[in-house]
Amino acid sequence: MDGPLLKVKPKWLLTCERDDPQLNECLRNVLAKIFPQLAVGIPEINVEGFEPLYLDRMTLSKAAGPVTLTGSFSNITVVGPSNSTPTYTRINISDRKMDIGIYFPHLDIVSKYDLKGKILILPLVGDGDCKMTLGGVDTMITTNISFIVREGREVLQIRTMHTKYTMKSIKIHLSNLFNGNKLLGATVNRFLNDHGIEIVQELEETIGESLSEIFLDITNNLFWKLPTEFWLPDHTTKISKSEENRR
């Protein structure tokens, strides 16, 4: 989260008063304006663009159930996040909670993979290249937040995050399954595509944990640098000392 605080309010940053009866909808509009800026980056506060989105690693670990997998995806490139849309926001300032829905119409993903386990009735072992296309991805994010003081100005920080998701379609191809066995590889890839939604649902908890780590870094890297006076001013309530002293 290195980088300076935003010094001047940009035109794309909308403002929501905390006592606004339509605060949730106002914050959804704030995010709708922020997302295009995140896609290209905000260099004045050292926020890199996320189109495409580059990720070092995403781990999977599920040891029980119809789908058991351990391993990881690495050197990940995701094309399509810039087309995302905030579907809802719900904030409870007194309880320090905020929920956000984000819809991704289409995501193209390429990466390296290293996986071992079982998918329903078939074993899966391999390491190589992964190509994946996801359609109609709905994410539901719940967070615990704090308002803290940084350099004398209030900012929002997300303390914890939990992510759930649904998707309408998935296409995937894993190269070099079973050490390059083409027959077994073709069988498993076909099975993955025929049962992709079911498999992804079985992996929701472990994938959700990895997504939360990713989203937490992205959102805190932004909110840590946006003084709330620009987008969520509070004219009545001071921050508690306990929150003020946290870093």
Image (cartoon, rainbow, N blue to C red):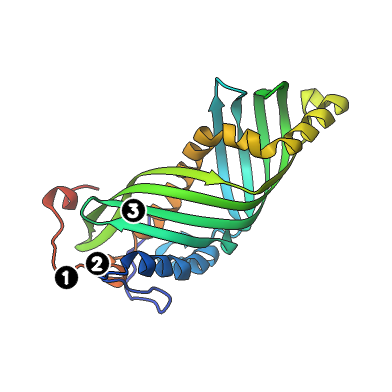
Q: Quadrant of residue 118?
A: top right
* Nearer the observer, 152 or 200: 200
Identify residue type, mark 2. Arg
Report crowding for label 3: few under 14, some 14 to 19, many 20 or more residues within 10 A (C-alpha).
some
Number of numbered labels in the structure image: 3
Mark 1 in CB contact with mark 2 (< 8 angstroms): yes
Q: Disc 3 marks which residue?
A: 98
Marks 1 and 2, how far apart at CA: 8 Å
Identify residue type, mark 1. His
Marks 1 and 3, how far apart at CA: 20 Å
x 50%, y 56%: residue: 102
Q: Disc 1 marks which residue?
A: 235
Instruction: Name the N-terminal-most of marks 1 and 3.
Output: 3
Q: Disc 2 marks which residue?
A: 18
On screen, residue 129 versus residue 21, left or right, reads right
On screen, residue 45 versus residue 152, left or right, reads right
On screen, residue 217 versus residue 74, left or right, reads left
75 w.r.t. 127: above or below = below
